[in-house]
Image: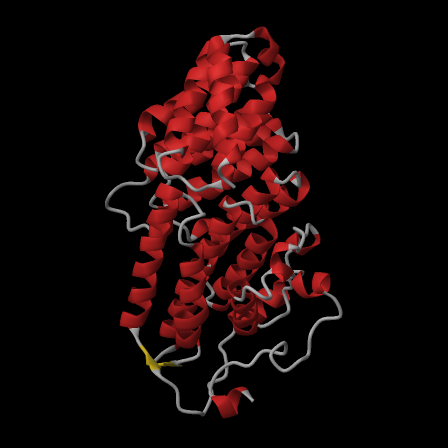
Amino acid sequence: MSRRLQRLVTPRELGFTAANAQEHNAPGWQTDPLTELAELGGTDLDLGRRHLLTNAVYSTAALTLPGQQWWDTMAAPQPAETRPRHRIGPADIETVRDLTAAFSRVDQQRGGGHGRKAVVQYLKTDVAALLQGSFSTESVQRDMFSAAGELAYLAGWMAFDNSEHALAQRYFVLAVKLAARADDPPLTAHILRAMAHQALDLGAPKQALDLSTASIDGPRYANATPRERALTGVVHARALATNGHNQAAARTLLQAEDDLTSADAGTPEPHRTFFFGEASLAHETARTLTALGDTPGALRHYQHSIRTRGTTFRRTHAVTLGYLGAAHLTQANLEEACTVWTTALDTIENGVHSARARQTITDMRNVLSPYRHRKIPLVTDLDTRAAHYLAHTR
């Protein structure tokens, strides 16, 4: 059917559905990435079927990575098809990368709630068609799969930021498949790092450590640029700290600092690392120190992150402010905490659509609850404003 229609036809379109929705929505490593892209994108964009994804559950079982044979098979050259296909060249790849960069900038500024459907629409239609084109060389084909993998990763990251965790996991797994087909170890590392980050946030520390360890394995770390090494390394440090490997976490933090220091303007970096600099490293270091029980150290690094980032990356700035306020409160600095949380609300209300940022406000109200009965004006005003914000957003 695919050959006759000259487009990919999925098993679901032909009526071969899974026995139940839960089975259908579980991320799987054996499904071909083009089939997965057509199925996942189609379901995500179809209002009548999207409940299959929104009702799905984040799966820790799907975080177990396949063995080496799977990676070797994915990276092996693919047999060429004989049917006439559109010729794909470097300009097509550059277009995908440019649009991915543009979508990524919006995500960093405004959060995953802005534009994710547009990303999925572009991935499902234009990019899927490009992946089925005719390639002049194997290198061009791999570059196209790499560009598609980065866009699929962005769709996953935006869903993660919007707390659509099962959906994010599906896109992350798809992105890993596309990166594996492209034989692109640094991109694979970048995606595995994101999966580890999600696992940490969702309370799956062991799986997070396995994923972050895989993200720095062999050529995934060795072939990466210094900035990307620092990014994957600092998330690995947090995973180590969360699992009680304190000394290893401290060593890994130092290595991440060294890697970022060695990055310079003369070293070409993939665009996907554009957001990661001194402020982001300080933010992740603070989260690691929190896991290590060093709240004063975490406070210093959160404050450094705020000073060095400013509001350039508004979404992450708001998240950092939320964590900084919580750290202040653990040190009994109620006034400082409320001041910081007020700034966080100012930032979020200025056009940020991010469930992660919103969660910091929910967490703030929870930790402030013991102070409500004391009738402290600063607390009362902030709590009232936060309650109004939460009641009118989702």
x%, y% of residue 278? Answer: 35, 32
Q: Nearer the viewer, residue 389 or 216?
A: 389
x%, y% of residue 288? Answer: 53, 29
Q: Nearer the viewer, residue 363 or 105?
A: 363
Residue 216 can be seen in this image: no
Q: Nearer the viewer, residue 354 or 76?
A: 354
In the current view of this chain or complex, which residue is farthest to the right? 19
Number of numbered labels in the structure image: 0
Compared with residue 366, is residue 149 higher up or lower down, i.e. above or below? below
Compared with residue 220, is residue 30 higher up or lower down, i.e. above or below? below
Compared with residue 336, is residue 242 higher up or lower down, i.e. above or below? below
Q: Which corner quadrant of the image does residue 261 belong to?
A: top left
Left or right of 58? Residue 124 is left
x%, y% of residue 118? Answer: 40, 60
x%, y% of residue 324? Answer: 47, 22
Residue drawn at (60%, 30%) of the image: 241
Residue 2 can be seen in this image: yes
